[in-house]
């Protein structure tokens, strides 16, 4: 996927502090459960630090390319059971809070890197546990238009490199709602991506991305994205077709 720029804005920094575990703030952490589509593995420990290791971020991560993932649930005891959900992407060693009440905005669903120790712990936990597959898009809602045929081409937007921070580049943003059969780290939120038809920038999980002109024309028109469009940068680099 190449090097990505990791953002260090004040908003991202506050997300790192706020998102390690709201369940933990509500009461004593009881367990962490890591799930694939057919089975789960539960980690229970008297050592709170051993459980929080799995969901405590080491910093803000850039948005990874869609790939297999797991669902992580943190259970705590506070006036009954509270449960908080994350997604974990092994290929990127990154977490993202699952969409839900109180986490509707994309800025609160920041991508978070885990520590090397946590990544090693996840590798041990999921050995033999099949992950959820990378999402396959059934439809995409772009502004007021719906794309069904060729919806999967919108996954190419995750191949574009970050342009760094710059919320001012997103004048009059339009939402891009990615719809898949099941929620994933990249889909299932009320506003998975957004772009500015005026400036040509796209917001993606806390990052800002410069959209090449060919793709921008398709976004503005609300249609499937054309293949093989090159980005600005080193010659010969092309967006890979979605699987």
Image (cartoon, rainbow, N blue to C red):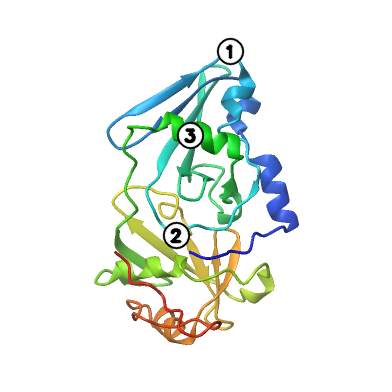
Residue tagged 3: 122
Residue tagged 1: 46
Give the x, y percent position of residue 178.
Answer: 38, 61
Residue 228, quarter of the rendered image = bottom left
Name the one closer to the observer, 108 or 104: 108
Task: Examine the rendering and report whether any part of residue 27 can be seen.
Answer: no
How many C-alpha atoms fall within 10 Å of the one at disc 1: few (<14), some, or many (≥20)? Answer: few
How many C-alpha atoms fall within 10 Å of the one at disc 2: few (<14), some, or many (≥20)? Answer: some
Q: Is residue 66 left or right of residue 75?
A: left
Give the mark nearest the N terminus, 2 or 3: 2
Residue 136, quarter of the rendered image = bottom left
Of the two numbered discs 1 and 3 in the rendering, the one whose residue sits closer to the viewer = 3
Residue shown at 40%/45% (left/top)?
69
Residue that protrudes farthest toward the top in the picture: 46
Name the one closer to the observer, 38 or 203: 38
Q: Secondary structure at mark 3?
A: helix
Give the mark nearest the N terminus, 1 or 3: 1
Q: Total number of numbered labels?
A: 3
Distance in Å between CA atoms under marks 2 and 1: 36 Å
Task: Examine the rendering and report whether any part of residue 70 can be seen.
Answer: yes
Residue tagged 2: 65
Q: Which mark is residue 150?
A: none
Distance in Å between CA atoms under marks 2 and 3: 19 Å
Residue shown at 29%/64% (left/top)?
243
């Amino acid at each position: 996927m190449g090097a990505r720029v990791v953002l260090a804005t004040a908003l991202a920094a506050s997300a790192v502090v706020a998102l390690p575990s709201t369940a933990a703030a509500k009461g004593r952490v009881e367990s962490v459960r890591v799930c694939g589509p057919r089975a789960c593995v539960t980690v229970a420990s008297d050592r709170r630090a051993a459980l929080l290791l799995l969901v405590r971020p080491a910093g803000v991560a850039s948005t990874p390319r869609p790939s297999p993932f797991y669902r992580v649930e943190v259970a705590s005891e506070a006036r009954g059971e509270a449960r908080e959900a994350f997604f974990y992407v092994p290929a990127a060693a990154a977490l993202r809070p699952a969409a839900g009440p109180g986490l509707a905005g994309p800025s609160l669903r920041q991508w978070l890197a885990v520590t090397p120790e946590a990544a090693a712990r996840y590798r041990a936990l999921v050995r033999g546990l099949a992950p959820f597959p990378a999402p396959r898009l059934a439809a995409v809602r772009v502004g007021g238009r719906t794309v069904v045929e060729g919806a999967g081409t919108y996954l190419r937007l995750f191949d574009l490199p970050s342009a760094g921070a710059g919320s001012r580049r997103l004048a009059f943003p339009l939402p891009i709602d990615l719809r898949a059969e099941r929620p994933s780290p990249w889909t299932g939120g009320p506003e998975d991506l957004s772009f500015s038809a005026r400036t040509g920038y796209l917001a993606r999980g806390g990052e800002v991305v410069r959209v090449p002109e060919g793709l921008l024309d398709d976004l503005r028109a609300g249609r499937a994205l054309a293949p093989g469009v090159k980005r600005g940068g080193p010659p010969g680099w092309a967006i890979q077709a979605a699987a």
